Each structure stands twice: as structure tokens, then as C-alpha cells.
Image (cartoon, coloured by chain):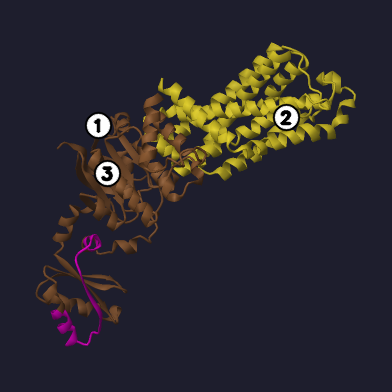
Chain colours: A yellow, B brown
């Protein structure tokens, strides 16, 4: 009972903090939205390269890239997650919680769930914008497909916020969390199938792409948009995200136990 | 009366080898108002962290509210209220929301919690600001909110780590008045640390003076002051650095002087004596026949600063400026 109710109270606390600082939401949405509205237009003629439609099944570059941008958003905001725990350590709020009988794991779980929720909210905004005529995304799988996409993205965000939380607790520095987040976002994004189809990539990038967890998540979102319920791709994505999550959340729990003692 | 805290031979060594608490023993009875007085870095906060289950002791025995701090940590947490040295309110939440959240942490809910929160807002005079975000509160308001959040579950034992550090005199007086009421009217046992002499003197019925992780003296403020000899005489010299040794010898040779302590280049010497009145004339006469020139002779009843000076050879006031080393995770102790 303690774990469940304490998690709920802490989830609500983080949510209130998020809603009362809308500027944060705006800033983390800014980049993916620029990508969605400008970058896809800039590379609009990419889709007329022979073989593009055969390789991707997408009628336009914007439709192809939206899946990647959705994951970029999840990835980017999950990597900021560690800054909030640093703030709680620095202000002494974490200690204030620790001298009460509050369930220790609720502190972590409330944080993770609110991160996943935040990613889902941001994704809904991006999905809504991707329905604009000049982006033109549609989902062959309809509303259930959109919900499944949201679930995949939130799950993906949850897995990656683990790494950020672990770094935050280890270094106790928001700057470091931001720097590492910013440092790895683009390399990992560019070395995946997020923005360029696999067969169009140079061979060495293809090799990395095939092992990049982002590629798996992007491919699953993409099939739900373009081709339908391709369960082998979807389940593979869940498997890979689950594996990433297991590693990052183990690191988080390990660091958290050191903080809580 | 039963003991609510008992500590014996407590030692805490940080991982870098710093011995922050060096074998202290004390006990506090139910209903007492007890204080730790000492400069920054003396080991006050470290002791509080151990008593409030935040930090694991290196050795010794510590019992709080009938539970061992190691095996009974979760039982202790239900019974104690803690206000840490830094004010920790969530600025994004309103005052009321801060208290509600703290109540939830203490497993309270519903009408009981709502009523308790209203009661506390009234107690600390934050009713009119209750639904404003705590970010916009003044320093004194935040401290009061923090104090209220430590009280939400009606703890029998309250730990306050430097509750008024950094506050203006008016806010400090307000906090003192709440604390006295809590102790007298509600019978809450209070353990407070402070580096302010006035605070220890006014609030604590019993106190321990702590320095470099050791308790150097303990008793009621009155006892401590009497113990060092009834009075003290502060002596300033025209050239303190040059004459201090000779002046000290001269003073020590006078009848009725129990101790002479060097304070610093400004205040120079402090003479402790059972009866200072007649001694003042002797001192002036003695200096008159030597070539040491007096600047001033001030007679005063002993303060806790004199007590600290007597036991440590240093003045607590000059220590306030020394920055405490930080090696706690998070840079605090």
C-alpha cells in the first residue's frame, strides 16, 4: 500500500512542477518541432530519389522521418530526467523525504512514471502536429496504432531516463547530466534509422545502425504508421527497449541505494 | 521521567577519514528542551543526521524513542519531526501543498490531514499566504513553513538543525516563541543545534557544548556559567601582541583570579574570577605600577561565550566566520 500511494503522491508532485514550469516543456519540444516542420521540408525532395518509396513504404520524407523525430523527442527529454533528482539532492528535499516513513522506491518510481508521462504528453503534441496537411502523417493501424506508438515511446523514454538518473545521482551535477545528454543524443540519432533509411546509409553506419536500440524503436513506430501490425518488428522493439531498460534501471537502482543507504 | 534519546560512545568517521563525531555520550529526557552549542563543523549536524536515521554511525550505541537507530530506523521515522539546516520547501508547490505532501509522506490523508494542515498554517501565521507558491515566500516564511512541515504528524520528538541561522531578528523571535510553546504546551521534546549563544541561552533548559566532535561541557546554561567562576573581566591593552604574556603573568599572580585566557588581538585577555568587583581595582593598580598600558577594563557577568572560551580556548564568535569543510555526499553535514 505504501509503495502505491507514495508513488502516486510523488507522481502528482512532479506533474505539478512540470505544469507550473511550462517553459521547460516548451524548450524540450522546440527542437523536435523544428525538425518536424522545417527539417522534413528541407529534405522534402529526398523521397524522389529512386528506390526511396520501395525501401521505406513512405509517400514522403516527412512521413518517414516523423517516427525518428518522435523518438528523438523521447530520447532528448528522458536524458534531462537526472537533473530533477540532482535538484532534490541539492535542495535537501530528498533528505527531507528520507527522514519520513515514505517508501524509498516510491521516490524513484514516481520520478520514472512522471518522466514517461511527460514523454507521452510531448509525443501527443508532436503527433497532433504531424497530422498537419504539409507533414501528412496517417496511421494505417488507426487509433489503436497511435496508442501503441505512444506506449512504445513512453516505454522507450522510461528506459533512457534510467541512464540519466544514474548519472545524476553519481555526479550530483545538473550540468554534467545536460552535457552528457546533449553529447550522446545526436550521434546516437544519426547512427540509426531515425532520419535516413538503412539501405541509403554508408556501410559502416549500417553496421552500427543495426545494433542501435533507437533503430528498433523507430522501426516499430514506423511499421505501425505505414504498413500495419508487423508483430515481429514490434516485439523485437519491446525486447530491445526492455533490455536497455533493465541495464539502465539496474544502474539507477544501484546508485539510488548508495544515496539512500 | 523516561529517556527519549540515549547516546553512548558515538563515533562517526567519514569515508575520507575525518572524525566528525569523536566518542560522545549524552541522554535527553522526555519533554526536555536540549541543545547542542558549537561552531560550524563541530559535529552538530552529523550527530543530528545519525539520530534521524540519515547517516549510519561508525560505532557506539544510539537509541531514539525506544528504538535502536540501526535496527529500528523505520519505527523512529514515524515518531520524529526534522527540520534540517537548509530550508527545504518545494518552491513550485504552495505552502498548503507542501504541508499536504509532507502529511502524505507520514501516511496521513483525508479530513484528518486537511484539518491538521489548516491548524499548522494558523500556528505559523501563514494562512493568508497558504495558497501562494512557496517560491515567493520570504526567508522567514519559508523557515516557518519548514517548521510546520516537521510538525504535521504531531511528532513526540523534534530535531532542529540551526533553525534560525540566517534569519532576521524579528523572524528569529517568532520561531523562538513557537518552539517554546511547542515544548511547554504540547510537551514535545526538542533537540536543537545552534551556533547562537542567545538562542541556546534563551531556549535550552540543558545544553552540551560541542567542539571538534567532542562534548566539552554540559549542564543548564546557569550551571555552565557558574562553573567557570561567577564573573569575567575583559581587558584590552594598548599593545596586546607585545604585552600579552607579561600581562597574563601579572594577572595570574593576583589573588582571587581563577583563570586568564587570551582571546585575540582585539579583545586581548579575559579574566575569570569568583568575585570580580574588588578585583577591578587591584587590576588597575597592578597595571599602573608596570609599564603595560591598559586600554579598557570591562566587567561582565559570564556568557555562554565565556563558557565556550574557557573550555576550548577560542571564542565561538570568531569561529562563525570559519567555513566548515564539506565532505558529506551533497556537500552538507
Spatial distance from mark 3 to mark 2, Cα to Cα?
A: 60 Å
- Dot 1 and dot 3 within a common chain: yes
Q: Which residue is located at x 19 percent, y 66 percent?
A: B301
Label 1 with label 3: CB-CB less than 8 Å = no
Spatial distance from mark 1 to mark 3, Cα to Cα?
A: 27 Å
Mark 2 burial class by Cα count in 10 Å: few <14, some 14-19, many 20+: many
Give the labeled residue for mark 3.
Answer: B181
Q: Is residue B189 left or right of residue A72?
A: left
Percent of width and height locating residue A110: 50, 28
A157 w.r.t. B320: above or below: above
Chain letter of the residue carrying label 3: B
Which label belongs to residue A203?
none
Instruction: Work out whether mark 1 precedes mark 3 in sequence or the reverse, and give the earlier one.
Output: 1
Chain letter of the residue carrying label 2: A
- Element marked by disc 3: helix
- Nearer-the-camera pick, A250 or B207: B207
Give the labeled residue for mark 1.
Answer: B67
Instruction: Give the extent of the magenta segment.
Output: B281-308
Give the labeled residue for mark 2.
Answer: A69
Amino acid at each position: 500500500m505504501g509503495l502505491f500511494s507514495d508513488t502516486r503522491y510523488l507522481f502528482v508532485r512532479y506533474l505539478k512542477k512540470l505544469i507550473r514550469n511550462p517553459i521547460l516543456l516548451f524548450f524540450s519540444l522546440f527542437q523536435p518541432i523544428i525538425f518536424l516542420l522545417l527539417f522534413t521540408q528541407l529534405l522534402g525532395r529526398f523521397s524522389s530519389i529512386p528506390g526511396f518509396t520501395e525501401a521505406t513504404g513512405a509517400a514522403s520524407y516527412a512521413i518517414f522521418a516523423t517516427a525518428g523525430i518522435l523518438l528523438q523527442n523521447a530520447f532528448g527529454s528522458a536524458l534531462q530526467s537526472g537533473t530533477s533528482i540532482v535538484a532534490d539532492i541539492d535542495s535537501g528535499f530528498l533528505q527531507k523525504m528520507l527522514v519520513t516513513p515514505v517508501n524509498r522506491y516510491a521516490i524513484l518510481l514516481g520520478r520514472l512514471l512522471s518522466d514517461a508521462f511527460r514523454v507521452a504528453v510531448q509525443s501527443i503534441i508532436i503527433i497532433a502536429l504531424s497530422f498537419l496537411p504539409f507533414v501528412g502523417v496517417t496511421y494505417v493501424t488507426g487509433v489503436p496504432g497511435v496508442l501503441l506508438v505512444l506506449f512504445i515511446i513512453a516505454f522507450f523514454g522510461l528506459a533512457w531516463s534510467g541512464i540519466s538518473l544514474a548519472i545524476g545521482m553519481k555526479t550530483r551535477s545538473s550540468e554534467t547530466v545536460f552535457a552528457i545528454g546533449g553529447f550522446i543524443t545526436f550521434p546516437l540519432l544519426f547512427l540509426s534509422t531515425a532520419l535516413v533509411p538503412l539501405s541509403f546509409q554508408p556501410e559502416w553506419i549500417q553496421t552500427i545502425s543495426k545494433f542501435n536500440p533507437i533503430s528498433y524503436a523507430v522501426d516499430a513506430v514506423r511499421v505501425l504508421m505505414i504498413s500495419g501490425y508487423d508483430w515481429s518488428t514490434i516485439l523485437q522493439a519491446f525486447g530491445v527497449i526492455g533490455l536497455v531498460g533493465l541495464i539502465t534501471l539496474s544502474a539507477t537502482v544501484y546508485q539510488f541505494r548508495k544515496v539512500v543507504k | 521521567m523516561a529517556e527519549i534519546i540515549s547516546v553512548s560512545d558515538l563515533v562517526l568517521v567519514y569515508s575520507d577519514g575525518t572524525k566528525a563525531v569523536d566518542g560522545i555520550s549524552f541522554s535527553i529526557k522526555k519533554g526536555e528542551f536540549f541543545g547542542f552549542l558549537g561552531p560550524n563543523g563541530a559535529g552538530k549536524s552529523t550527530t543530528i543526521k545519525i539520530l534521524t536515521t540519515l547517516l549510519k554511525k561508525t560505532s557506539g550505541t544510539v537509541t531514539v524513542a525506544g528504538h535502536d537507530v540501526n535496527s529500528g530506523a523505520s519505527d523512529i521515522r514515524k515518531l520524529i519531526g526534522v527540520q534540517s539546516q537548509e530550508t527545504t520547501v518545494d518552491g513550485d508547490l504552495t505552502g498548503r501543498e507542501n504541508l499536504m505532501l509532507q502529511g502524505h509522506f507520514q501516511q496521513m490523508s483525508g479530513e484528518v490531514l486537511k484539518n491538521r494542515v489548516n491548524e499548522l498554517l494558523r500556528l505559523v501565521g501563514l494562512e493568508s499566504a497558504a495558497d501562494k507558491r512557496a517560491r515567493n515566500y520570504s526567508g522567514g516564511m519559508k523557515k516557518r513553513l519548514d517548521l510546520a512541515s516537521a510538525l504535521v504528524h504531531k511528532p513526540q520528538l523534534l530535531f532542529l538543525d540551526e533553525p534560525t541561522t540566517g534569519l532576521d531578528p524579528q523572524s528569529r523571535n517568532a520561531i523562538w516563541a513557537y518552539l517554546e510553546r511547542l515544548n511547554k504546551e504540547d510537551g514535545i521534546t526538542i533537540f536543537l543545534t545552534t551556533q547562537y549563544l542567545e538562542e541556546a541561552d534563551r531556549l535550552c533548559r540543558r545544553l552540551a557544548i560541542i567542539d571538534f566532535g567532542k562534548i566539552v561541557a554540559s549542564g543548564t546554561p546557569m550551571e555552565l556559567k557558574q562553573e567557570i567562576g561567577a564573573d569575567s573581566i575583559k581587558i584590552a591593552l594598548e599593545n596586546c601582541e607585545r604585552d600579552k604574556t607579561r600581562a597574563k603573568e601579572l594577572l595570574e599572580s593576583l589573588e582571587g583570579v581563577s583563570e586568564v585566557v587570551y582571546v585575540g588581538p582585539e579583545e586581548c585577555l579575559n579574566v575569570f574570577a569568583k568575585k570580580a568587583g574588588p578585583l577591578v581595582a587591584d587590576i588597575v593598580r597592578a597595571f599602573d605600577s608596570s609599564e603595560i598600558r591598559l586600554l579598557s577594563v570591562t566587567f561582565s557577568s559570564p556568557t555562554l561565550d565565556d563558557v565556550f572560551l574557557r573550555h576550548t580556548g577560542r571564542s565561538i564568535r570568531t569561529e562563525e566566520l570559519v567555513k566548515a569543510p564539506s565532505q558529506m555526499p551533497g556537500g552538507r553535514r
